[in-house]
Image: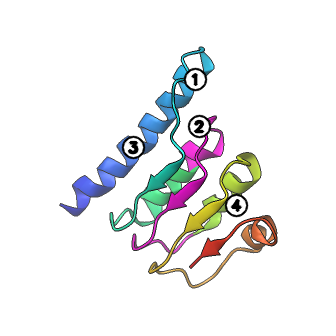
Amino acid sequence: MLYSLKAGIVSLADGLKGMQQLDSVGNSTFSLISLELQENAMGNAGFAAICEALKTSHLPVETLNCSSNEISDLSKLSDVLKENGRLVNVELNDNAVTEIPDDLLDAVLGTLPLRL
């Protein structure tokens, strides 16, 4: 069960990249503004895959909820915030975060409500 959840998150990330490719050829009928992915046990690998998909995405995602997903590494999130200016709300409650990277703090301070 846990493997299939993690594989599903990676498939979702691949799908987000595919939506971006469709958008680049002029078929932009997407209005995905919120990704509610809480309680999926995605872990660091799944979170990194979602961050990579959102980093260069043209999708108008404004909210990312990855609460309760066994995430401890937030290093990929700073890249998303630097590259994708549309993300304005990130929820990471009830994860295993013990340290917030300095570059993430720089990207967040004054611009984004981040809930840990």
Judged left or right of residue 22, residue 38 is left
As measured in the structure, the alpha-carbon distance from the residue carrying label 4 to the one carrying label 3 is: 20 Å
Name the mark nearer the viewer: 2 or 4.
2
Q: Which residue is mark 3?
A: 12
As measured in the structure, the alpha-carbon distance from the residue carrying label 3 to the one carrying label 1 is: 16 Å
Percent position (x, y) of residue 92? 52, 72
Disc marking residue 23: 1
Percent position (x, y) of residue 64? 53, 58
Residue at 74% over, 49% down = 85
Contact, mark 1 vs mark 2 (Cβ under 8 Å): yes
Q: Earlier in the sequence, mark 3 or mark 1?
A: 3
Q: How is the image coloured?
A: rainbow
Q: Is residue 23 magenta?
A: no
Which of 72 and 68 lies nearest the eye of the viewer?
A: 68
Judged left or right of residue 28, residue 106 is right
The amino acid at mark 4 is Ser
Which of 18 and 64 lies nearest the eye of the viewer?
A: 64
Name the mark nearer the viewer: 3 or 1.
1
Q: Earlier in the sequence, mark 1 or mark 4?
A: 1
Task: Check the image and report above or below for 33 versus 38.
Answer: above
Q: Which residue is mark 2?
A: 59
Q: Earlier in the sequence, mark 2 or mark 4?
A: 2
Q: Secondary structure at mark 4?
A: helix
As measured in the structure, the alpha-carbon distance from the residue carrying label 2 to the one carrying label 4 is: 18 Å
The amino acid at mark 3 is Leu
Residue at 23% over, 53% down = 4
Q: Which residue is mark 4?
A: 78
